[in-house]
Image (spheres, rainbow, N blue to C red):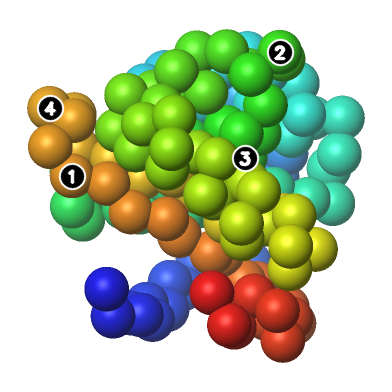
Amino acid sequence: MPCVTTTIYCTAELKRKWPKPLAREWSSSYPHLFDASDLEQAENQPQHHFNEWLAAVFLFHRDGMFALVEKYHLEQSHKNKFDIVRKLIGKEGQAFLLDDICEKLGIMPPDLFVYSPDFSRFRFVEVKGPRDKMCPSGKRV
């Protein structure tokens, strides 16, 4: 699968609204993208997650795709997300992602797991902000 780069621009005004009140507004407007755990994490870590949430909203509007924002690899604390990923890539796919890629390379899973509402398509999305860089291990994947 080829790597595709997309640049998303937003206003400084929108960024200033993060996380309050924007995370709560987006959580309410897009319940199929963000759950209560996502909202809690965004509000408790105000310096993080804006870029991932913006990308999820953008991809929903552009492609009609749903996105799981972070922690989709944790069965214990995010079972619903974990189950969606398992439905799409299977137990073997999850093991390959977590064991053969993430653990061996010492990296976290991609920021977003994006999928079609009918579960016919999926993709992984790595989100980088204006000053973020892809680590060498992440580029190898």
Contact? badges 2 and 4 (CB < 8 Å):
no
For residue 40, side relative to residue 24 (left or right): right
Q: Earlier in the sequence, mark 4 or mark 3?
A: 3
Q: Which residue in the structure is indicated by mark 2?
A: 76
Q: In which quarter of the image is residue 67?
A: top left
- Residue type marked 3: Glu
User: Does label 1 or label 2 sit earlier along the sequence?
Assistant: 2
Residue type of the residue flagged with mark 2: Gln
Q: Circle 1 sits on which residue?
A: 121
**Label 2 Cα neighbours within 10 Å, binned few <14 / some 14-19 / many ≥20:** few
Query: As shown in the figure, which amino acid type bears the numbered disc 1?
Result: Arg
Q: Where is residue 33, by image quadrant?
A: top left
Q: Residue at x 18, y 44 (%)?
A: 121
Q: Which residue, given by chain and number where applicable, does mark 3 sit on?
A: 70
- Circle 4 residue: 118
| Residue drawn at the location 72% of the way across and 15% of the way down | 77
* Label 4, label 3: how far apart the Cα atoms are: 21 Å
Query: Tag 1's secondary structure?
Result: loop
Q: Alpha carbon of mark 3 to alpha carbon of mark 2: how far?
A: 14 Å
